[in-house]
Image (tube, helix red, strand yellow):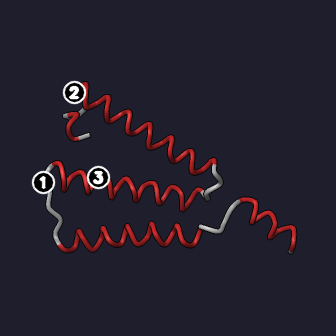
Amino acid sequence: MKLSNEFTNLPWTVITLIFIVISAVLLNVGLKAGLPMGPCYAVWVGIGAIGSIIVGLVLFGEVLNIVGWIFLAVIITGIIGLNLITEGETPDSKENEKKSA
């Protein structure tokens, strides 16, 4: 998005919009697969944040201080934690729990 120069550089604007659409489509795929909305959205946002940080570090030479690295680790830990606690949960398993109760 930074390379689009506030959406005035047409090629980078188009590339940015393509990546935004791909990202939303992938979120939709996860939701259609039965992933719970809350954790799915949180992971989607976290991956976007991590991706933005990596692009900034690699392409634009940005630097993170120690606190930035700690918070990046917190985001990654949160994504892993959400995946672990929602791994076994599917809409079918919740319906089965209600029927058996």
Task: Say few, some or many: other residues with alpha carbon within 10 Å of mark 1 (under 14 / 14 to 19 / 20 or more).
Answer: few
C-alpha separation, residue under disc 1 versus residue under disc 3:
12 Å
- Residue 66 quadrant: bottom left
Which residue position holds label 1?
Answer: 61
Amino acid type, label 2 = Thr
Numbered disc total: 3
Question: Closer to us: mark 2 or mark 1?
Answer: 1
Residue 40 is left or right of residue 56, and the answer is right
Residue 67 is left or right of residue 39, and the answer is left
Q: Earlier in the sequence, mark 2 or mark 1?
A: 2
Residue at position x 16%, y 69% from top?
Answer: 65
Q: Earlier in the sequence, mark 1 or mark 3?
A: 3
C-alpha separation, residue under disc 2 versus residue under disc 1:
23 Å
Which of the numbered marks, if any, corresponds to residue 8? 2
Q: Earlier in the sequence, mark 2 or mark 3?
A: 2
Task: Say few, some or many: other residues with alpha carbon within 10 Å of mark 3 (under 14 / 14 to 19 / 20 or more).
Answer: few
- Residue 96 quadrant: bottom right
Residue at position x 21%, y 27% from top?
Answer: 8
Amino acid type, label 3 = Ser
Residue at position x 42%, y 55% from top?
Answer: 45
Which of the numbered marks, if any, corresponds to residue 52? 3
Residue 38 is left or right of residue 64, and the answer is right
Amino acid type, label 1 = Gly
C-alpha separation, residue under disc 2 versus residue under disc 3:
20 Å
User: Looking at the picture, does residue 28 appear above or below residue 40?
Assistant: above
